[in-house]
Structures are given as C-alpha cells and as structure tokens.
Image (tube, rainbow, N blue to C red):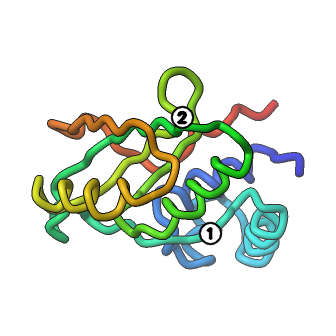
Amino acid sequence: MKLDTIDMRILAELQADGSLSNVELARRVHLSPSPCLARVKALESSGVIARYVALANAAALGLGLNVFISISLKSQAKQALADFERRIAEHDEVMECYLMSGDADYLIRVALPDIGALERFIVEQLTPIEGIEKIRSSFALKQVRYKTALPLPATG
C-alpha cells in the first residue's frame, strides 16, 4: 500500500491515541469523517495498522522489574529454535523475544514484580525448557525512554 501525507498523519494520531473517535481523528487530519474512516479501514485491511491496544503502567501493576535475559541454545537446528520459541511464548512475563545474531541466540525482556519472581521464573520456567545451554540476565536500572509509536517515513 502506497502511503501519502494524510495516511501518515492518521497513523501519527492513532499511534499517539488509538482511542480517538473517527470524528475527532478526521478533525485532526483535516478530512471529513467518511473519507477518514475509509482511509483507516484501508490501513487496517492492508496490515499497516496491526491492532489497537491499551498500554498499562507496569509499575502501577506491581511489575517494576524489567529484566533482559540472553539465552543460548545447545543447538541452532531449525526444530530446536521452533521448540524454544513455542515454549517461551507460553509465558505471560515475556514481553518481547528476539532471535539474535552474535553470542546469544535469543534476547527476551520480562516484566516481573521483584528479584524473587525473577529467580522463580528462571528456575521454574526457563531452565526446564529443553535445549537451553546458557542464561544471562541484565537488569534495567532506569527506563530512560519508552515509546510504542514507530517512526514514520517521510512521504514525497
């Protein structure tokens, strides 16, 4: 889908506040409601807009510990990777999981309430996963920046 300046403005507004009504969104991007809604529907059907979510405050929910865990597997065979990915996706604490290049095979970010929960997660959830060779944790001391809005390319 070829995106124009108006599509980018729509995306910017929805990334900032996905709960905007169509009427308010149309006002902000200087369109009438009907063409605005048609553009939003086109962005959704093309997959540019993947979904709408409410972002919860982790600290307010008692999840003040952000931990990045590097995981190396014994084997990088296709089935071993698929098995690990299936197992790691079962855990609600895992906020993100990336297949990496370099020393670690995977990098995951977990949101947990405290160190005790981290210990339980590693011992009871991670170590039983078949094929894990090494686990290394790094703690986020302070969140310097957090955003969910993607940078939008310039149109032209």
Q: Position of residue 125 (x, y in %)?
A: 34, 63
At label 2, the amino acid type is Asp
Nearest the eye: 90 or 35: 90
Position of residue 102 relative to residue 47, above or below, is: above
Quadrant in the picture for residue 63: bottom left
Q: Residue at x 78, y 73 (%)?
A: 41
Instruction: Report the residue marked by disc 2.
Output: 105
| Cα gap from disc 2 to disc 1, whole angstroms | 28 Å
Tag 1, which secondary structure?
loop
- Side (left or right) of 146 relative to 154: left
- In the depicted structure, whether residue 136 falls above or below residue 125: above
| CB-based contact (under 8 Å), mark 2 and mark 1 | no
Q: Position of residue 81 (x, y in %)?
A: 64, 47
Horizontal side of 97 relative to 156 (left or right) equals left
The residue most toward the right is: 1
Other residues around mark 2 within 10 Å, as few (<14) / some (14–19) / many (≥20): some
Callout 1 crowding tier (Cα within 10 Å): few <14, some 14–19, many ≥20: few
**Looking at the image, is mark 2 or mark 1 nearer the viewer?**
2
Q: Which residue type carries mark 1?
A: Arg
Q: Secondary structure at mark 2?
A: loop
Determine the residue positioned at 25% across, 35% down: 138
State which tag comes first along the sequence, 2 or 1: 1
Mark number, residue 74: none
**Residue at (47%, 36%) from the top-left corner?**
72
Q: Nearer the viewer, residue 85 or 25?
A: 85
Percent coordinates x, y for residue 21 in the rendering:
55, 78
Residue designated by label 1: 51
Q: Which one is nearer the viewer's eye here, 45 or 74?
A: 74
